[in-house]
Amino acid sequence: MAGERPTTSERATLDPFDALAGDVPPRDQRDLMERPFFSLAKAKRVTPILYQSGAIQVQVYAVPQHGMATIWDADVLIWAASQILAAQDRGLPTSRFFRFTPYQLLIAIGRATGNREYQLLKGALTRLQSTVIRTTIRHGEHWRRQQFSWINEWEELTTRAGRCEGMEFVLPEWFYQGVLDRRLVLAIDPAYFALSGGIERWLYRVARKHAGRQRDGWRFELKHLHAKSASLARFSDFALDIRRIVARQPLPGYRLALQRDDGGELILMRPNPTTGPVDKLCNSSAAIGTSGATGIGISGAPVSGLRAHKLPLTHSPHGESGAPKDSKSESKFFVVEETLRAGKPRRGFARRRERTP
């Protein structure tokens, strides 16, 4: 046996869930699409994310040895969420304790299946386990902060000759419950996995979450969007990357446009009328969250607090459940990044770009 295993395994108390074979429609968890939980860069990030929007707090800490979990690593969680909901659709029991083969996971998220990808998968699992998240999201009636890692434990099952016969991991309760609540899940386009850049992957998730299938879409001020991303890039570099993404139009199911007003530069995200709602890809007995409001959301109130200051496992419109959230609710927020030097926290900026090498 190889892998990361605590002294007392949580798997001893859980029934295993064997991953489903065949194609499973991809679904993403709304909280992970809404807040900055992941590094957007393939270079190792150890600078923490400290984010607050109203009563919502997100803090993400990395272990220097491995670095913070990335938006490419998050594909593992998308795959897990998709498996859980597909099993429910088929009337099968689910569990936080997954059993699967690397081939199943890699194929599902659009990766090759060679030894390099297998090693990258193990690196992703390590980062997902070592990254620590503290958040007040879904804290219930009484305020509290929850702390967890994206994977509680994982293990590689190998023969004496070193051949991998399977893998196992255990998801945290916070993520698992967020998937079981279908109001907190959105179908995504399988083409998402082909997006190569960290910012464009993140931008797709933002568009999918906020614009959904609303005819008039959603728009953000670029400065607000920069802070919302917790990007380590300078705003000028971030804005340049956004402009290049708008020029290329790579997001499946969405059209992007830039606008200017008195408050500065904005990005408009609209569903692409030439593509159908991605939800039709999911034959679900229970509804996945949707929205159909036609009003355009505008995010752009001045950002308060400090400005934001970058690893990897390497559609389509239909919004969230209930009334669509106006991103004005995020206008009073801050993102704080701390770098430790000489034992004291220091606020600062890293000037690293977040584009795929």
Image (spheres, rainbow, N blue to C red):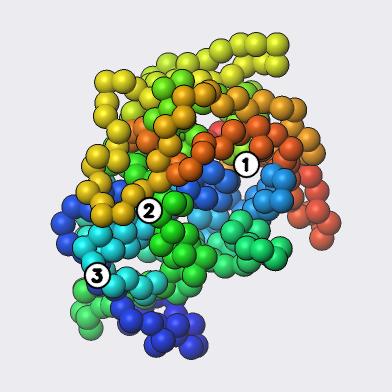
Question: Which residue is found at the position 46% from the left and 65% from the top?
Answer: 177
Mark 2 → mark 1, Cα distance in angstroms: 21 Å
Residue 317 lies left or right of residue 344; in this view the side is left
Residue 326 lies left or right of residue 30; in this view the side is right
Residue position marked by numbered label 2 in the rendering: 78
Residue 298 at x, y = what percent? 60, 25
Residue position marked by numbered label 1 in the rendering: 230
Question: Which residue is found at the position 71% from the left and 27% from the top?
Answer: 301
Q: Label for residue 92? A: 3
Residue 228, by quadrant, is: top right
Mark 3 → mark 2, Cα distance in angstroms: 19 Å
Residue 299 at x, y = what percent? 63, 28
* Helix, strand or loop status at disc 3: loop
Closer to us: mark 2 or mark 1? 2
Residue 162 at x, y = what percent? 24, 76
- Return the residue nearer the eye: 133 or 13: 13
Q: Is residue 122 above or below residue 13?
A: above
